Amino acid sequence: MTTHVTLEQWQALIAVVDNGGYAPAAEALNKSQSSISYAIQKLESGLNIRAFKIEGRKAVLTSAGQTLYRRAKVLLEEAEQMETMARGFATGKEAEIKIAMDTLFPDYVLLAALQTFITDNPMIRIELKETVLSGSDESLLRKEADIVISGHVPPGFLGDPLIQVAFRAVAAPTHPLHQLARTLDYQDLRLHRQLVVKDSGSRGQDAGWLGAEQRLTLSHSNTSIRCAVMGLGYAWFPLLKIQNELNQGLLKPLELASGAERLVELYLIYREGSYARPATKQLGELIRDNVKKAML
């Protein structure tokens, strides 16, 4: 099969759109503006269509150009993934694996997987980033992680269910909510301080906040648990993370009329999908195996 458009020409099309014009596209690609214009002309003549139309002084995509732009993005991503995969084959294994893990995931499970993986692959560098809410999505979209453990699979990616995390509303035994000695409702909770973990991404999402006037926002779940033990507020925590505190009587479940328990599904996502490199897939399978062991 003979193609009439090169990857370089598709790259020029994408750069013009993403950077808002021929001049900024040339700067982004470190090329001359004339070479960008020539690439677009060759693309249009090769396909016998108009990708851009001029409105005022600005080049705007035609309806056909909009479709080509979307498909070209996918095409270049596929080409990039294939090159990455080929480099992995050439060198045997990747030099580094980056992981973004939602803090809801039990860290001891991941560490057990890493212990086995590092023993087998001592020369591969590992970078672990702990995320909250949209932080996982951003790690994928910005290509900052090879493996992501997240409660959400963003559009354009595929993820497999990894673990279902059970949450429970709790507070210290001395907390005023426990002193009411009755089943609690929404209004009771709103009158007291809620502990909330801050979104590590830029979206500033609030998961589970009830709108309480008194609110203590923290950047990590472990700090939030310590605050709850000290009686600084109530929160919903993953049972896997507070089992010791519950067993020792440091935290006590709140008796709510409804909503005392919550379930969140976490997913394992490879940024490169089926193109994920061998060692990345090996680590992903080790994570999955250690989840199964932890659930026994």
Image: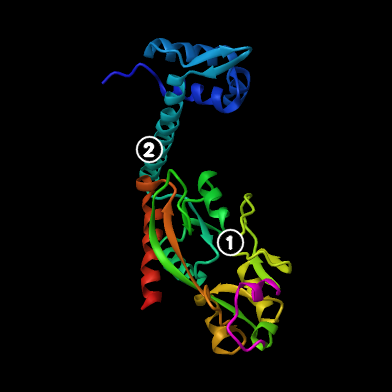
Between disc 1 and disc 2, the foreground one is 1
Would you say residue 186 sits in the magenta stretch? yes
How many marks on residues? 2
Q: Position of residue 121 (x, y in %)?
A: 42, 60
Q: Residue at x 38, y 76 (%)?
A: 295
State whether the magenta stretch is mostly helix, strand or loop. Answer: loop
Residue situated furthest left in the rendering: 1
Q: Is residue 190 found left or right of 256 in the rendered image?
A: right
Q: Are marks 1 and 2 in contact (CB under 8 Å)?
A: no
Would you say residue 224 sits in the magenta stretch? no
Residue situated furthest right in the rendering: 214
Alpha carbons under labels 1 and 2: distance apart: 37 Å
- Above or below — where is 227 with respect to 151? below
Mark 2: which secondary structure? helix
Q: Position of residue 100 (x, y in %)?
A: 52, 56
Q: Residue at x 58, y 61 (%)?
A: 207
Q: Looking at numbered disc 1 in the image, what kind of residue is underneath it? A: Ala
- Quadrant of residue 172 in the image? bottom right
Q: Is residue 136 found left or right of 78 in the rendered image?
A: right
What residue would you read off at disc 2?
Answer: 82
What residue would you read off at disc 1?
Answer: 207
Which numbered disc flags the more N-terminal residue, 1 or 2? Answer: 2
Q: For the magenta stretch, what is the residue range? A: 180-192
Q: Position of residue 282 (x, y in %)?
A: 37, 58
